[in-house]
Amino acid sequence: MSAETGPSEAELEERRRKAQRARSVAIGLALAAFVIILYVATWAKLGAGVLMRDL
Amino acid sequence: MAEMTGHSATGRVTKGEAAVSTALPSDYFELLKPRVMTLVVFTAIAGLVIAPGHLHPVLALIAILCIAVGAGASGALNMWYDADIDAVMTRTRSRPIPSGRVTRDEALAFGLTLAFFAVFVLGFLVNWLSAGLLAFTIFFYAVIYSMWLKRSTPQNIVIGGAAGAFPPMIGWAAVTGTVTLESLVLFAIIFIWTPPHFWALALFKSGDYEKVGVPMMPNVAGNRSTQNQILAYSLVLAPVGVLPWLMGFAGTAYGVVSIAAGLGFVWLALRCWQMPSDDKAMLPAKKLFAYSILYLFVLFGALILEAALPGLAALVMGVAS
């Protein structure tokens, strides 16, 4: 009786690889969104004043 | 290398000592309790829209995003702590941690990271009062409610309900930088709404809670006492729901809607109260639970519409002329 219930080693490795890539893409998108949010928020808060500051 | 690689029953691939996750982004998204988040976002928008004052639309969107992420972080931390009982209850056993898709450590790290970013972004970009309230809300839900109250007292959701009641207050504070009587009334509506909402659910899910030893009101005080308390809270909720109109920070349309919705709530609570406490189907409790969600959406939806419609109408007229 050699009834295999779970996925094979190769299938799991493939799932792991795909999941890791999907997580990497999600983290990349979240970081990009974070940068855009900070950029837009800076303009919203300071407007043209972003260029007017004492040096 | 192959001899070092194996896999567990949960689908996690292991290499030597380390386990490599097969969790997808959607599993992490599920940790955020998106359905709860919807209600949080909705009530926060209401607080933000009706608050006197002006907040730049971009900053308003960021405030809503931060509140949503903060609420999601609370959900992840709650799932991290409650993984043991989630695995037993039918309603929760397919969640990412009990089903083995995400580990507890991963959920904890995810929740803490999101909480940190949500609070600090809100603080730096909007104001620190709203950020402080958000931080307190996350702490209240994850520590006071999940870790302490939930497993120790049948008053768990009465006190814990405060966590769900803070979002409109955070939205209000994001605009005004203050906590006022008006924002406390918005808080009170959700705070008083929570017990009848959850106890209606607990009536027909009491077996689940009993199995894991969570002292929900029906398991501790019995169905009859729970039904009495549901009715009592509903009788308080209906007039409190009308307060925004009576106090003048909502209009007549809200007043009419809140009176009608409140009467509906009391009517269904009365039906629930009349239900035999050993009723098998518990239909009146199920109806009250479903209606309670609608009630909150209708009340806060009316607040949003009433505040936003004049501006939208002016915009449309301006474009048309």
Image (spheres, grey):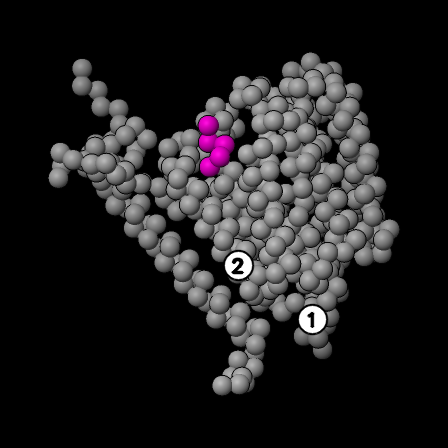
Disc assigned to residue B60: none
Q: Quadrant of residue B95?
A: top left
* Number of other residues with Cα within 10 Å of mark 2, as a class: few under 14, some 14 to 19, many 20 or more: some
User: At 48% from the left edge and 51% from the top edge, which residue is drawn?
Assistant: B114
Q: Is residue B298 left or right of residue B12?
A: right
Q: Chain of mark 2?
A: B
Q: Is B271 situated left or right of B283 in this image?
A: right
**Mostly what secondary structure, the magenta segment?**
helix
Check disc 2 and report the residue beneath it. Answer: B120
- Residue type for callout 2: Phe
Write down the quadrant of residue B213 in the picture.
top right
The residue shown at (75%, 44%) is B188
Q: Answer above or below: position of B71 versus B117.
A: above
Image quadrant where residue B153 sits: top right
Residue B237 lies, in percent from the top left, at: 79, 38
Query: Magenta region: which residues?
Result: B80-84
Q: Position of residue B73 (x, y in %)?
A: 51, 46
Q: Secondary structure at mark 2?
A: helix
Q: Which mark identifies residue B315?
A: 1
Report x, y in % for residue B112.
47, 47
For disc 1, the chain is B
Cα gap from disc 1 to disc 2, whole angstroms: 34 Å
Rendered position, A48 above or below B97: below
Residue at image location 38% in from the left, 53% down from the top: A26
Q: Is residue B185 visible?
A: yes
Looking at the rendered structure, the kind of residue marked 1 is Leu
B272 or B64: nearer the viewer: B64
Q: Is residue A23 left or right of residue B222?
A: left
